[in-house]
Image: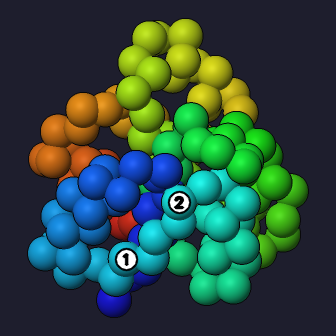
Amino acid sequence: MKKILVADDKPSSRELIRTLLEHSGYEILEAGDGQEALDIARASAPDLILLDIHMPVLDGYGTVKAMRQDEKLQSLPIVALTASAMHSDRDRALKAGFTAYIAKPVSLKTLRDGIGNLLAAK
């Protein structure tokens, strides 16, 4: 079973994504801020990370930067999942090291298909 880490400071967002992905057969880990996401990723080696950009303690940009510098995590698919939906936000996220970008509110089909494609390419 593939393991996905969902990092978002809003419990309701994590719950929605967790419910969808568990029904799709994934094991879900959760983090409420960037530092917690980094700690969990290092300890549990997920197959993919969904990472909100705007979080407390360590934001998504700081988190993805730290992950890309960690030998165990540097090739891991990391998806920016954010309400920042301007084209420049997408470009900035991809340049920062995110593998893909999905804007909120997220289409559940888009999320499921995107995750499936990234995991299949891994």
Using the image, determine if residue 93 lies above or below residue 9: above
Which residue is denoted by mark 2 in the rendering?
Answer: 32
Please state the horizontal and vertical placement of residue 48, each as a whole percent of the image: 49, 65
For the N terminus, the image quarter is bottom left
Q: State the count of labels.
A: 2
On screen, residue 60 versus residue 121, left or right, reads right
Question: Depth check: 54 or 77 in front?
Answer: 54
- Residue 102 image offset from top left, x and y in percent: 37, 36
Amino acid type for the residue under numbered disc 2: Gly
Q: Is residue 2 left or right of residue 15?
A: right
Residue at the image point whose x is 61% and y is 85% from the top = 44
Q: Secondary structure at mark 2?
A: loop
The residue beneath circle 1 is: 28
Viewer-nearest of labels 2 and 1?
2
Label 1 sits on what residue type? Ile
Q: What residue is drawn where x is 17% and y is 64%?
A: 20
Q: Is residue 122 visible?
A: no
Where on the picture, by quarter, is residue 11? bottom left
- At 15% from the left and 47% from the top, the residue drawn is 108
In the picture, the disc for residue 115 is none
Image spot of residue 63 (x, y percent): 72, 50
Instruction: Please indicate, yes or no, whether residue 81 appears anywhere in the rendered image.
Output: yes
Distance in Å between CA atoms under marks 2 and 1: 13 Å
**For residue 27, which quarter of the picture?**
bottom left
Q: Callout 1: helix, strand or loop?
A: strand
Q: Position of residue 106 (x, y in %)?
A: 24, 38
Residue situated in front as seen by the camera: 10 or 40: 10
Q: Residue at x 46, y 70 (%)?
A: 30
Q: Are marks 2 and 1 in contact (CB under 8 Å)?
A: no
Q: How is the image coloured?
A: rainbow
Answer few, some or many: residues within 10 Å of disc 2's Cα (few below 14, many 20 plus, some between 14 and 19): some
